[in-house]
């Protein structure tokens, strides 16, 4: 990978589900250290796009370049091996295991005694404690089962685990849907910190305010195509809503919606 080359580059990605054309030729990039917010109305194609990036679905056509090379991920496992992972709150942690066990899941440190592998619990605990400390994450005990932790803490564990094991691009799907105000604030901070370490981040969110707080760039998907790809400092929530709803808000200024009654617009407006 050469300097200035995006970490991820999608070229003309299409996806059909039978007769449904979920993606109609998407071009998109994510650079190292960049946070890209992916926005769009329900059914626009956001989930389909990130599932292609993370190896859940193959694209029907188009190219996926990762670190300068054309790649094809046949499964999430293959994408993960390349350094791409989706963090779904709750879904990828084992709730009846403790923080240390979750952090090491499948990568445990063992030593052989009389030919039998024995878990090196203290050593593993030290590694996790250090990773949490470096990330500024406070968990009361690393030996508590994950089911007893808050949504924000679980998310922090997942992100720290991703960073620790050399992740390069992380996809966060509605990361704050179930979080309170304070946890969301910490989550947004954590995303910025993860990106500052050189990781590429894609955040799917319906909440415009969060997109503007955390993202360097906002990509709007509408009806399976990119309707806008905008630097945060060069756009406004009103313009982004306009793109989400298909330019039906051409009179949407900062001081009003011009009486727009489009349900999609009204829905987005209430999220601001
Ligand atoms: N497995 C599937 N089989 C058939 N159609 C699908 C499948 N997955 C998605 N679609 C269709 O593709 C289109 C895009 O859906 P997608 O879930 O990617 O949208 P989205 O932007 O993530 O929406 P939401 O915000 O509601 O999650 C929709 O028309 C959806 O019904």
Image: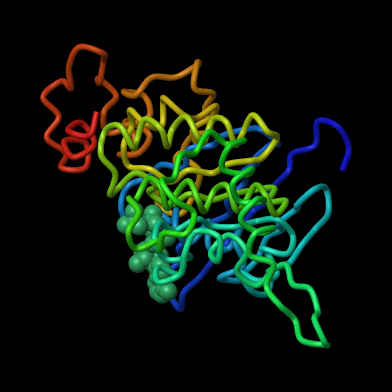
Q: Residue at x 62, y 35 (%)?
A: 134
Relative to 89, does residue 60 appear above or below in the rendering?
Answer: below
Instruction: Looking at the picture, tell me which residue is in the foreground, 61 or 69.
Output: 69
Residue 113 x %, y %: 80, 81
What's the residue at 44%, 19% (across, down)? 235
- Residue 19: which quarter of the image? bottom left
Q: What is the basis of the colouring in this image?
A: rainbow
- Split into quadrants, the picture shows ligand 1 in the one at bottom left
176 lies left or right of 114: left
Looking at the image, which is closer to me, 221 or 56? Answer: 56
Query: In this rendering, does residue 43 appear at all?
Result: no
Q: Quadrant of residue 47?
A: bottom left
Which quarter of the image is occupied by the C terminus? top left
Give the side of residue 220 with respect to residue 265, left or right: right
Viewer-nearest residue: 225 or 160: 160
Q: Is residue 170 visible?
A: yes
User: Quick check: 260 left or right of 113?
Assistant: left
Quarter occupied by residue 83 = bottom right
């Amino acid at each position: 990978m050469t300097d200035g080359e995006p970490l991820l580059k999608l070229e003309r990605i299409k996806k059909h589900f039978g007769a449904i054309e979920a993606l109609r030729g998407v071009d998109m990039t994510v650079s190292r250290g960049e946070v890209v917010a992916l926005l769009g109305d329900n059914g626009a194609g956001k989930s389909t796009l990130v599932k292609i990036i993370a190896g859940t679905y193959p694209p029907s056509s188009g190219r996926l370049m990762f670190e300068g090379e054309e790649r094809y991920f046949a499964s999430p496992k293959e994408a993960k091996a390349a350094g791409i992972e989706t963090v779904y709150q709750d879904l990828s942690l084992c709730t009846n295991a403790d923080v240390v066990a979750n952090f090491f899941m499948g990568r445990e440190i063992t030593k052989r005694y009389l030919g039998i592998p024995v878990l090196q619990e203290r050593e593993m605990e030290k590694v996790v404690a250090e990773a949490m400390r470096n990330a500024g994450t406070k968990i009361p005990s690393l030996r508590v089962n994950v089911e007893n932790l808050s949504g924000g803490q679980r998310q922090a564990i997942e992100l720290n685990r991703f960073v620790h094991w050399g992740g390069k691009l992380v996809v966060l799907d509605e990361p704050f849907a179930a979080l309170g105000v304070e946890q969301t604030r910490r989550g947004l901070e954590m995303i910025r910190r993860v990106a500052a370490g050189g990781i590429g981040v894609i955040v799917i969110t319906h909440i415009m305010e969060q997109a503007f707080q955390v993202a360097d760039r906002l990509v709007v998907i509408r009806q399976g195509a990119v309707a806008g790809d905008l630097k945060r400092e060069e756009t406004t929530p009103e313009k982004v809503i306009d793109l989400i709803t298909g330019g039906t808000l051409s009179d949407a200024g900062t001081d009003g919606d011009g009486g727009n009654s489009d349900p999609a617009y009204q829905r987005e407006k209430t999220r601001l």
